[in-house]
Amino acid sequence: MKKYFLHGKLQAKAGKGEQLAEILLQAAALLSDAPGCQIYLIGMDPDDPDAVWVTEVWDTKKDHDDSLRVDGVRALIGQAMPILDGPPTKGQELEILGGQGIG
């Protein structure tokens, strides 16, 4: 199964984790119909309320890269950047070996 799997953490400034999560949930809604988007999950770390995790599965890396041009996505990135505690780190690119949920 060849898919593009990306997993990473975004660290918000103190007290801004919920705001960052809401922005990412808006992005998830925009990407729900994006070509190649299989999964776009947002999660919060219960031990660090300012850490927001994003897990993405795309048919291809190109589909992921193209998603950055979906209407509204750049605006949401612009909203998120000022509340991040430093520049975003590169997410982990992983290889899917199998499991439940992806066809």
Image (cartoon, rainbow, N blue to C red):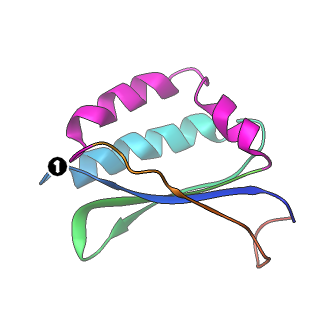
Q: Residue at x 74, y 38 (%)?
A: 63
> Is 48 positioned to the left or the right of 25 in the image?
left
**Farthest residue toward the left?**
14
Quadrant containing the N terminus is bottom right
Q: How far across and down, in percent of the image, does residue 58 sit? A: 72, 50
Which residue type does callout 1 highlight?
Lys
> Is 96 positioned to the left or the right of 67 in the image?
right
Quadrant containing the C terminus is bottom right
Q: Residue at x 24, y 77 (%)?
A: 47
Q: Residue at x 74, y 37 (%)?
A: 62
* Depicted 8 relative to depicted 19: above or below: below
Name the one closer to the observer, 87 or 3. 87
Q: Which residues are magenta?
A: 59-86
Q: How far across and down, in percent of the image, does residue 21 sit? A: 35, 50
The majority secondary structure of the magenta stretch comes to: helix
Magenta stretch encompasses residue 31: no
Describe the element under mark 1 as helix, strand or loop: loop
The quadrant holding residue 80 is top left
Q: How far across and down, in percent of the image, does residue 65 sit? A: 65, 34
Q: Residue at x 31, y 29 (%)?
A: 79
* Depicted 25 relative to depicted 71: above or below: below
Magenta stretch encompasses residue 79: yes
The image shows a total of numbered marks equal to 1
> Is 91 positioned to the left or the right of 36 in the image?
left
Q: Mark 1 highlights which residue?
A: 13
Q: How far across and down, in percent of the image, does residue 100 sit? A: 76, 77
Name the one closer to the observer, 75 or 93. 93
Report crowding for label 1: few under 14, some 14 to 19, many 20 or more residues within 10 A (C-alpha): some
